[in-house]
Amino acid sequence: MEFGIPRELVILIKMSLTETYSGVRVGMNVYDRFPIRNGLKQGDALTPMRFHFALEYASRGVQVNQDGLKLNGTHQLLAYADDVNILEGSIHSLKKNSESLVAASREIQLEVNANKTKYMVMSREQNAG
């Protein structure tokens, strides 16, 4: 009960993800159902909550450098919806925490989209990076 969710509710949620199917209806035509093999169903009322818990689990997998950059007394991992920002004081620490986040995400079958991944180096020095 890592997030304080009762075991019975976890079982019900798992049941709602097992052997699920979707179908397409265009006008009055209903097409064959097809299985949902991975991911969450769009429009499902529980999807945002399940995604939030999955992202929280993955972010806990990041080994936060206790000597690293702090913002208002908080360490460097910021997440909102499906966006994650990792703030670090060095490129080495950024790579280490990014790799930890990717590995923790893989454990729960989340995928980091490399094509949407961006990074920015900020420094007071002329030749940062």
Image (cartoon, rainbow, N blue to C red):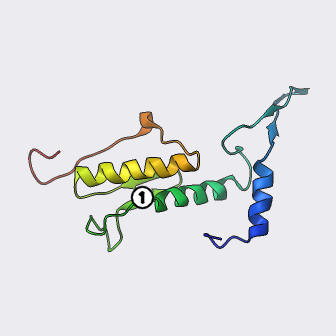
Give the secondary structure at mark 1: loop
- The quadrant in which residue 2 appears is bottom right
Q: Nearer the viewer, residue 97 or 30?
A: 97
Horizontal side of residue 29 vs 78, given as left or right: right
Looking at the rendered structure, the number of numbered marks drawn on it comes to 1
- Residue 25: horizontal and vertical position, in percent? 84, 30
| Farthest-out residue, right | 28
Residue 77: horizontal and vertical position, in percent?
39, 60
Q: Residue at x 58, y 50 (%)?
A: 108
Above/below status of 67 relative to 48: below
Quadrant for the C terminus in the image: top left
What amino acid type is highlighted by mark number 1?
A: Val
Question: Which residue is drawn at the image coordinates 37% and 49% (left, top)?
Answer: 98
The residue most toward the left is: 126
Q: Judge from the rendering whether residue 99 lies leftward or rightward of residue 128; answer left or right.
A: right
Q: Quick check: 87 above or below 74?
A: above
Give the x, y percent position of residue 62.
42, 58
122 sits left or right of 104 in the view: left
Q: Position of residue 38 (x, y in %)?
A: 67, 40
Instruction: Please report the residue visible at 38 percent of the width from the left and 61 percent of the height from the top.
Output: 63
Relative to 31, residue 105 above or below: below
Where 113 sits versus 28, above or below? below
**In front here: 33 or 6?**
6
Which residue matches tag 1?
Answer: 62
* Mark 1, other Cα within 10 Å: few <14 / some 14–19 / many ≥20: some
Location of the N terminus by quadrant is: bottom right
Q: Return the residue nearer the eye: 27 or 83.
A: 83
